[in-house]
DNA sequence: CTAGGGTTAG
């Protein structure tokens, strides 16, 4: 079952180097003869669109100051990831009123389709697919993967499957790749039995390869059914297909997930014995697996061993170690490892910072959390909504509501916008001090979130309402009541 | 986006 595998030595891609991009990777406008437009400030743009009435958004699009490029449109769509109605409206108006020199890219269409599918607005999804088709931009297999994934996530795996079976009607033929993709989508949404049945039914037609088998085995690992995973792999070998290092790494991770630590270690020793070319993924799995099981010493031992064996840790390996140190050891040690990785020339990424910031917040070291948050820009990774939510959450928990609000204020002006969680965390924090002014703030936040297309839970709404009535803010409460009638009607009232 | 390693707040 074990085969000899050779891995190329790790390139130095983890080191702090920013090589110049080849010309074909630069944004389109830099290749044209016209001078490049002034750099667009996405944050300013976001504010503009957020605060613009949908009816006058057209004027924003036609503003000669803004040079729309496909890159800028994608960035803006990304920024509005949590503001689905705004994002779609932005996409559509720009599409209707486009200048002769601008059309959406296939990637933007895929993005818009993803957003519409996330809202369960399937009418919009198919409208976009049709428009994409008429522009000869797709739909591509990727487009179908996106829609299928949203179906699966919405608890409609059958529709995901049917979509796959009808792809050819949209000019996109099924092949082994798309077959593997649909299997993976079903497995990742924990519909492993269904994926397995589909696999058994169609493996002959699509000539299932070792990737297909790996996907199904991984699916059984995800639901902690290791015997089933082994069974699938046994069949693969019987079919004459070779298992690869990926196969073994899948199984190794599966044992840890199923809390079978002893079996995981035994399996790893087997891998070593059979010389199947243990790599950085194998070691990262071990570090994370042992760490999560509370075996910090063994996690560190593995980490030291990999370096001795000539396998360089990656940023992901460091992230795994830092995370488990935060959870099961001490934040102090996690910070030491962080400084060590930086000293070696690694560039921490968003996950590194989020893990560490969370760890620091958790032990109440808010100042240091903020300090690390400030360091993020130096490594070209801006804090994202998760980073902000963590910090805001812990400030509020610690009773430092003002600081929480202050951090929230920074969020709106940056390249990351508050999401539903942000509002929920802040609004619930407005009730702990029993100050009447806090309730006014809660009311304001509630109105703002609804204006931005988020839907407060009934509980939140009633909580704010009652609070305002009890503190004698009848007028404000009335305003909220008007909102309530709008919210009650239907979840996405900004339908386009 | 054809498969394996890191984030989601107790």
Image: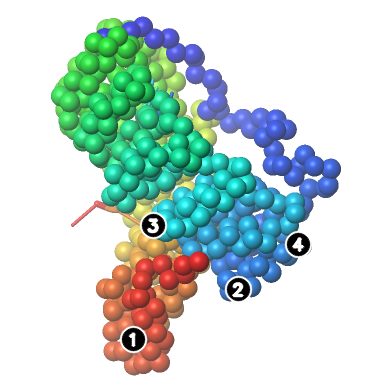
Name the mark nearer the viewer: 2 or 4. Answer: 2
Residue that badge 3 annotates: A120
Task: State if disc 4 and disc 1 touch (CB < 8 Å).
Answer: no
Q: Can residue A406 be seen in this view?
A: no
Q: Earlier in the sequence, mark 4 or mark 3?
A: 4
**Alpha-carbon distance for marks 4 and 3?**
35 Å
Left or right: A401, with A11 as reference point:
left
Q: How is the image coloured?
A: rainbow
Name the mark nearer the viewer: 1 or 4. Answer: 4
Quick one: A236 or A441, which is closer to the camera?
A: A236
Q: Position of residue A212 (x, y in %)?
A: 33, 24
Q: Do labels 1 and 3 share a chain?
A: yes
In which chain is the residue bearing label 1?
Answer: A
**Alpha-carbon distance for marks 1 and 4?**
43 Å
Q: Residue at x 38, y 42 (%)?
A: A163
Quarter of the figure with the N terminus of chain A: top left
**Alpha-carbon distance for marks 2 and 3?**
24 Å
Q: Label 1 neighbourhood size at 10 Å, few (<14), some (14-19), many (20+)? A: many
Q: Which of marks 1 and 3 is nearer the N terminus?
A: 3
Residue that badge 1 annotates: A468
SS for callout 1 = helix
In which chain is the residue bearing label 3?
Answer: A
Q: Are marks 2 and 4 on the same chain?
A: yes
Label annotation for residue A65: 4
């Amino acid at each position: 079952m074990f085969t000899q595998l050779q891995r190329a030595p790790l390139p130095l891609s983890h080191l702090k180097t920013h090589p110049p991009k080849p010309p074909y990777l630069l944004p389109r406008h830099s290749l044209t003869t016209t001078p490049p437009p002034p750099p667009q400030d996405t944050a300013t743009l976001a504010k503009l669109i957020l605060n613009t009435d949908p009816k006058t958004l057209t004027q924003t699009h036609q503003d000669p100051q803004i040079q729309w490029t496909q890159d800028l449109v994608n960035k803006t769509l990304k920024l509005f990831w949590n503001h689905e109605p705004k994002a779609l409206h932005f996409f559509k108006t720009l599409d209707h009123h486009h200048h002769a020199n601008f059309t959406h890219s296939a990637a933007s269409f895929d993005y818009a389709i993803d957003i519409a599918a996330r809202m369960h607005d399937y009418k919009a999804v198919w409208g976009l697919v049709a428009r994409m088709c008429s522009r000869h931009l797709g739909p591509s297999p990727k487009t179908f993967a996106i829609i299928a994934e949203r179906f699966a996530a919405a608890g409609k795996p059958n529709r995901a499957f049917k979509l796959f079976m009808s792809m050819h009607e949209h000019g996109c033929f099924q092949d082994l790749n798309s077959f593997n993709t649909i299997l993976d989508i079903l497995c990742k949404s924990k519909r492993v039995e269904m994926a397995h049945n589909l696999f058994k039914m169609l493996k002959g037609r699509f000539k299932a390869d070792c990737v297909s088998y790996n996907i199904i085995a991984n699916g059984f690992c995800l639901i902690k059914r290791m015997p089933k995973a082994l069974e699938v792999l046994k069949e693969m070998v019987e079919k004459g297909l070779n298992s690869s290092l990926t196969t073994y790494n899948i199984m190794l991770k599966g044992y840890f997930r199923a809390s079978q630590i002893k079996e995981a270690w035994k399996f790893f020793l087997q891998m070593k014995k059979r010389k199947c070319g243990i790599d950085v993924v194998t070691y990262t799995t071990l570090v994370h697996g042992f760490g999560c099981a509370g075996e910090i010493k063994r996690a560190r031992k593995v980490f030291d061993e990999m370096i001795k064996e000539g396998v360089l840790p990656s940023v992901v390996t460091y992230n795994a170690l830092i995370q488990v140190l935060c959870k099961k050891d001490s934040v102090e040690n996690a910070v030491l490892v962080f400084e060590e990785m930086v000293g070696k020339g690694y560039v921490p990424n968003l996950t590194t910072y989020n893990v560490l910031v969370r760890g620091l917040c958790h032990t109440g070291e808010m100042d240091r959390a903020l300090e690390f948050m400030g360091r993020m820009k130096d490594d070209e990774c801006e804090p994202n909504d998760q980073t902000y939510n963590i910090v805001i959450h812990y400030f509020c928990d610690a009773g430092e509501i003002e600081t929480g609000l202050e951090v929230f204020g920074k969020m709106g002006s940056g390249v990351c916008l508050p999401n539903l969680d942000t509002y929920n965390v802040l609004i619930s924090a407005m009730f702990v001090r029993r100050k009447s002014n806090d309730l006014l703030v809660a009311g304001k936040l509630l109105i703002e979130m609804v204006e931005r297309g988020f839907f407060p839970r009934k509980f939140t709404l009633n909580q704010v309402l009652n609070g305002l009535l009890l503190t004698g803010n009848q007028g404000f409460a009335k305003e909220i009541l008007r909102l309530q009638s709008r919210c009650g009607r239907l979840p996405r009232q900004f339908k386009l």
